[in-house]
Each structure stands twice: as structure tokens, then as C-alpha cells.
Amino acid sequence: MDELPVNTIEANRRMGHFEDRDRVWLFGYGSLIFKADFPYIAARPATIRGWVRRFWQGSHDHRGTPGAPGRVVTLIQQEGATCHGMAYLVTPEEFAHLDHREKNGYLRFATEMTFDDGTTAEGLVYIATDDNEAYLGDAPEAEMARQIANAAGPSGPNRDYLLMLAEALRNLGAQDAHVFGLERHLFDK
């Protein structure tokens, strides 16, 4: 089997963010919204500021393969932007599972999140930055949608990831022109 272009498990394990806490908030903006396959203490809709969700990260291990990667979301800094998602209160033990799940280029970063009631908390978010080997970057919307429509991996078709994310965002009442635009392209075929 081909190796992943990048594996960030060890890098994330060396990070010392919040290691002194017995509970940590985790912000999910992609598959973590619709597939919370880990125990959590609480879950709340939340936002983070200064970031937008983009299908710019390659998926070689879940929604694609090393030879035919899918596209999944990461966060890109954008002044004035707000990204909607779900926040999960977890124990630090859950990061062993999460680090493995997010191993294809994602690193943990500290972030402040705002809950629907206006309260805030500091927590962690996984972001695949543009310097990781699995990063695909921007492309024309139709091209990205075509790649998503044709890719599949051990976690299923890449198109399912896009469609489940779009549905989850609608359920949150969140608008995301990028996600919804790619979804429209899937059905233009």
C-alpha cells in the first residue's frame, strides 16, 4: 500500500496545548460536524473568526487514495470572516483517536470559539496548512467538484463527504458559498 504524503500524528502528540486540563473544547468545521465518532461531554454550535472553510486539502486516507486523492476541507485565514461549526467538550484522552483520524496533514492549533449564546472559550482546532505535502490548494470550482465526484477511499465516496457537510451546515443554519457552490456543481453533471 502507498504511504501517505504526510502523517502528523507524532507532531500533534508533541504539542503541549492544554495538557494541564481535564477537559478541552474542540472545534469541528468539516466531517467532525456530521461524524462525531468519539465520546464527548457536551456539543454546541460555535463559530471562529478570521477563517473560512475551503476544499483545499487532499484526502489520501479517508475520501481518496494516495494515487487518487479526494478533497476535504481545511481553514484558510480571511480577515473579517466567520466559520460556523460544532464545538465538542472532550477529555484529553480523545486526542489519540482524533490525531489518528486527522493524520493526513492536520495540526492542532489553539483558537477562541464563540457559542450561540455569545459566551467564548479557548480550545483546539485541526488545520491543514499550505505547507503540508497533502495540500492541494485552490482550483476552479468545477474542477474541484469533478475531483470530489470521482474520488473514493476507505471512508466512502468523496461526494458523500461534501453532501453530508452541506446538509450539516444547513441544519446549523450556516451559509457557506464555497461548500454550497461545489454541491451545485455535483448536480450539474
Image (tube, helix red, strand yellow):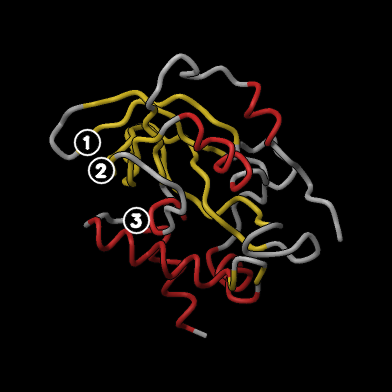
Numbered disc 1: secondary structure: strand
Q: Quadrant of residue 34?
A: bottom left
Q: Are marks 1 and 2 in contact (CB under 8 Å)?
A: yes
- Please provide percent x and percent y for residue 3: 84, 52
Q: In front here: 131 or 64? A: 64
Name of the residue lying farthest toward the bottom: 189
Mark whose residue sits in front, 3 or 2: 2
> Which three-letter amino acid code belongs to the residue tagged 2?
Arg
Quick one: quadrant of the N terminus? bottom right
Mark positioned earlier in the residue sequence (1 or 2) = 2
Marker disc for residue 115? 1
Q: Residue at x 65, y 71 (%)?
A: 152
Q: Is residue 31 above or below residue 162?
A: above
Marker disc for residue 176? 3
Q: Is residue 95 left or right of residue 117?
A: right
Marker disc for residue 44? 2
Q: Residue at x 40, y 22 (%)?
A: 22
Give the distance between the C-alpha atoms of the residues marked 3 and 2, in whole angstroms: 19 Å
- Please provide percent x and percent y for residue 18: 46, 18
> Which three-letter amino acid code belongs to the residue tagged 1?
Phe
Q: Are marks 3 and 1 in contact (CB under 8 Å)?
A: no
- Please provide percent x and percent y for residue 107: 59, 33
Q: Is residue 165 left or right of residue 70?
A: left
Give the distance between the C-alpha atoms of the residues marked 3 and 1, in whole angstroms: 18 Å
